[in-house]
């Protein structure tokens, strides 16, 4: 067959020009673009607290990894984590029973292992915390002591003021001697209708590890007036 005739005045279309290889590759010695920061995740913390003071190297590694991932506000370095803390990071499973752990559990703050931060850095995003839980929360975090009244006479391992904060954080109610039907902390003396409670028992009820629930007290008799109450012992040093 004869070849098709070209239209008069038309020129054959030129193929698209290829980009030179020099345009595709960055020039030698040019600065590389830094990787984009990880996208925000639902698992991302708003503020971390740590209980890693016994392992400074791990503490610094966790801080650096959290900063690279983006951890909201700077880590909380207070002795007691506040309500603005979203996660408490500990070394691993079976964490030490520190003041930070007690208050984190009392306030319903998830307690996770440092592995959560390190594995999240490897994944370039915050991973869900379910696989990294270091301490299982009690059934009702923030309400472990709800419905119970407490009289704090003195401190023990933690000061009286910290004990009061812990009771309130776990949903308990602070009362004076005139109230009655209360658990007495820091004294073996308890007026009628009240009962002494050891600091150790308080801790186990806050952590949800007590063998039996905290018993309800009945108002059997009126307790002594505040002026008749025994003098408070001196507070112990905080730890």
Image (cartoon, rainbow, N blue to C red):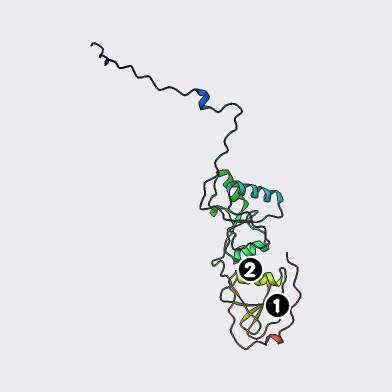
Residue for point 69% across, 71% down: 161
> Percent position (x, y) of residue 35?
56, 39
Give the number of the disc on residue 83. none
Give the number of the disc on residue 153. 1
Residue for point 68% across, 49% down: 60
> Percent position (x, y) of residue 158?
71, 68
- The span from disc 1 to disc 2 (Cα, nearest Å) is 19 Å
Classify residue 32 by image quadrant. Answer: top right
Q: Would you call the spot at circle 2 few (<14 residues within 10 Å), some (14-19), or many (20 or more)?
A: some
82 on left or right of 229: left
In the foreground, 66 or 14? 14
10 on left or right of 200: left
**Image quarter of the N terminus:** top left
Report if residue 128 is visible in the image: yes
Q: Kindly state the secondary structure of the residue where label 2 is placed.
A: helix
**Image quarter of the C terminus:** bottom right
Please report whichever mark, 1 or 2, sits nearer to the chain's N-terminal start: 1
Residue for point 64% across, 64% down: 102
Q: Would you call the spot at circle 1 few (<14 residues within 10 Å), some (14-19), or many (20 or more)?
A: many
> Percent position (x, y) of residue 76?
64, 57
Residue sticking out furthest to the front: 9
Q: Kindly state the secondary structure of the residue where label 1 is placed.
A: loop
> Percent position (x, y) of residue 121?
58, 45
Residue for point 76% across, 75% down: 234
In the foreground, 165 or 207? 165
Say if 90 sits above or below 186 in the image: above
Q: Nearer the viewer, mark 1 or mark 2?
A: 1
Say if 104 sits above or below 160 in the image: above
Residue under label 2, please give it: 204
């Amino acid at each position: 067959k004869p070849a098709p005739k070209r239209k008069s005045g038309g020129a054959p279309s030129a193929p698209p020009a290829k980009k030179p290889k020099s345009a595709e590759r960055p020039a030698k010695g040019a600065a590389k673009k830094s990787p984009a920061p990880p996208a925000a995740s639902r698992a991302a913390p708003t503020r971390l607290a740590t209980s890693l003071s016994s392992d400074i190297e791990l503490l610094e590694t966790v801080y650096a990894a959290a900063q690279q991932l983006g951890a909201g506000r700077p880590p909380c370095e207070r002795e007691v984590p506040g309500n603005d803390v979203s996660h408490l990071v500990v070394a691993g499973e079976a964490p030490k029973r520190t003041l930070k752990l007690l208050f984190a559990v009392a306030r319903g703050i998830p307690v996770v292992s440092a592995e959560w931060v390190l594995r999240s850095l490897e994944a370039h995003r915050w991973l869900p915390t379910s696989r990294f839980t270091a301490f299982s929360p009690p059934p009702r975090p923030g309400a472990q002591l709800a419905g119970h009244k407490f009289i704090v006479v003195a401190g023990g391992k933690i000061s009286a003021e910290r004990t009061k904060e812990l009771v309130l954080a776990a949903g308990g109610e602070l009362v004076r001697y005139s109230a009655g039907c209360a658990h007495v902390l820091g004294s073996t003396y308890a007026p009628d209708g009240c009962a002494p409670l050891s600091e150790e028992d308080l801790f186990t009820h806050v952590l949800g590890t007590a063998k039996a629930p905290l018993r309800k007290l009945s108002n059997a008799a009126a307790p002594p007036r505040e002026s008749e109450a025994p003098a408070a012992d001196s507070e112990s040093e905080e730890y």
